[in-house]
Amino acid sequence: MDQNYKTVLLFGPPGVGKGTQGHILKHVPGFFHVSTGEIFRNLDIESDIGKVFYQYSSRGELVPDDVTIKIWHQHVYANTILGLYKPRQDILVLDGLPRSVNQAKMLFRYIDVLKIVHLVCKDKEQLFERILKRAMKSNRVDDAKHDVIRRRWEVYENETYPVLSYYPPELVVEIDAMQSPAVVVGAVLDVVAPLQSKHFENPLGK
Ligand code: ADP
């Protein structure tokens, strides 16, 4: 049976800090963070899906939509079974999904989007710098080469950015991602905290 997971989307270009915000929210009770990039990176690189991921991500391309949605759904479902994600109590935080309008359409039957946190950075070069630094620290093949980063940007602009117009504009809240980290965290919490009390009478499930 399909579920309407109450969901917040973390949206923005590569390197803007979606993952950082997602990791912070993960530690707040009542939020369950899922990053498709992370799910993919944790796959065994020798597995069939691991190979598909490498083939696309090493070129800065998106993994095909059907593979992405399937593996995302399996991950979420497995976490409900394990009791790590409780759809009746937790807000699902999606980081890096949907990344195309087609993915947004495929997710329609599963998620009820409450808000979209759009992390904005007008300075592309600053983001490129961040991505390169991160690549050196965390050994990410998709980020280590300049042409791959540029391709990721094109993909973002052509395929991912249009996702914003798929959803009602009143759901979108823009946050300047270049403010100091604590200010960005505060701004994100200001958006998501009211959702907890509005949608879940008893957020901690007690
Ligand atoms: P970033 O945080 O830098 O934007 P991610 O870690 O989210 O990057 O993603 C890394 C790679 O994983 C992407 O370049 C892409 O190949 C693949 N990927 C992640 N999410 C998706 C998605 N929703 N659809 C297709 N491919 C994805």
Image (cartoon, grey):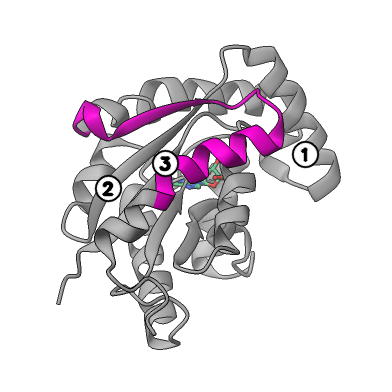
Front residue of 48 and 89 = 89
Q: Nearer the viewer, mark 1 or mark 3?
A: 3
Depth order, front residue of 125/201? 201
- Which comes sooner in the sequence, label 3 or label 2? 2
Question: Residue 107: percent from the left, percent from the top?
Answer: 24, 53
Q: In the picture, residue 137 is in which quadrant?
A: top right
68 is higher (above) or lower (below) than 165: below
Q: Amino acid at mark 3?
A: Val
Q: Secondary structure at mark 3?
A: helix
Q: Secondary structure at mark 1?
A: helix
Q: Is residue 191 magenta?
A: yes
Q: Is residue 71 above or below residue 116?
A: below
Neighbor class of circle 2 (other Cα within 10 Å; few <14, some 14-19, many 20+) is some
- Classify the position of the C terminus by image quarter: bottom left
Q: Bounds of the magenta span?
A: 167-193
Name the residue: 35% across, 44% down.
Answer: 98
Mark 2 — residue? 114
Earlier in the chain: of badge 1 and badge 2, it is 2
Give the Cα distance between marks 3 and 2: 10 Å
Q: Mark 3 sits on what residue?
A: 191
Q: For the residue carrying disc 1, how many other residues have a C-alpha within 10 Å: few (<14), some (14-19), or many (20+)?
A: some
Residue found at x 60% / y 41%? 185
Q: Which residue is mark 1?
A: 134
Position in image of residue 65 (x %, y %): 33, 49
Q: Nearer the viewer, mark 1 or mark 2?
A: 2
